[in-house]
Image (spheres, grey):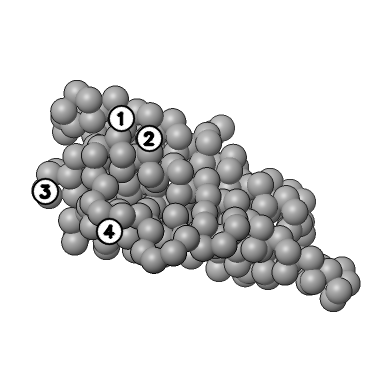
Amino acid sequence: MKLSKKDWASVPVIVLVAANILPLWGVYFLKWDAFYIILLYWSENLAIGFYNILKIATAKVKHPIEHLGKLFLIPFFVIHYGGFMAVHGLFVLAFAKKIEGPLFSGKAWPCFLVFVQLLIGVIRQMFLAIPPQMKFAILALFISHGVSFVYNYLLKGEYATAKPKELMNRPYSRVVVLHIALIASGFFVMVLGSPIPLLFVLVIGKIILDVKMHIREHKKAKAIT
């Protein structure tokens, strides 16, 4: 897909690129290795899931009673996506042998809520494994997706045509296409000892893919409106 100057100049894209440049700074100046980059990209999926919940909650419906359906969709998404993220993150931590102590604190939560509990445990392990400066990079990614949510979804009116059931599946396509590929590449770089040139290629490749997918997604939404 060809990107115009107008595409690159949009506020969400500028913020997206700025947030994704931070890992380059971390790699060059703070000696972040492939494991930290993989965890950073995994944490971005948390931002995607968080804002997707807000999208479902604020999606316009034809009849007020349809809001009741969201009371089922949102908890289902939290459990299903939360479980997906938990297993994904656990695999990354286990591969790098970065699990310290138990994942669960106290008794296991009932039924499917155990997946949410597992995700909380994985997030706790992630924060134990990363350097303090990396928390700012994670915050930047959350802000980037927040800017896109406000600018495109709320101000540009995407919420008016968004369908809650379709929103349920949207994060998975992004994770599978973008993050799984990048994390697989990250493991390859990790095995090679995380050389800086390959880490730069990984991060720059992610920026290009991310921008293309971002613009493609919102152009589709604009076409519907």
What kind of element bears circle 4? Answer: helix
**Which residue bears the numbered disc 3?**
29
Specify the amino acid type for callout 3: Phe
What kind of element bears circle 3? Answer: helix
Specify the amino acid type for callout 4: Phe
| Crowd around label 3: few <14 · some 14–19 · many ≥20 (10 Å) | few
Where residue 155 sits, quadrant-wise, is bottom right
Q: Is residue 41 visible?
A: yes
| Crowd around label 4: few <14 · some 14–19 · many ≥20 (10 Å) | few
Badge 2 vs badge 1, beta-carbon distance below 8 Å:
yes
**Which residue bears the numbered disc 1?**
187
Specify the amino acid type for callout 1: Phe
- Image quarter where the C terminus lies is bottom right
Could you tell which of marks 4 and 2 lies nearer the N-terminus? 4
Q: Quote the CA–CA distance across marks 3 and 1.
A: 21 Å
Q: Quote the CA–CA distance across marks 1 and 4.
A: 20 Å
Q: Quote the CA–CA distance across marks 2 and 3.
A: 22 Å
**Which residue bears the numbered disc 4?**
127
**Which residue bears the numbered disc 2?**
183
| Front residue of 105 and 67 | 105
Residue drawn at the location 36% of the way across and 64% of the way down: 105
* Nearest to viewer (mark 4 / mark 3): 4
Q: As drawn, is 200 to the left or to the right of 55? A: left
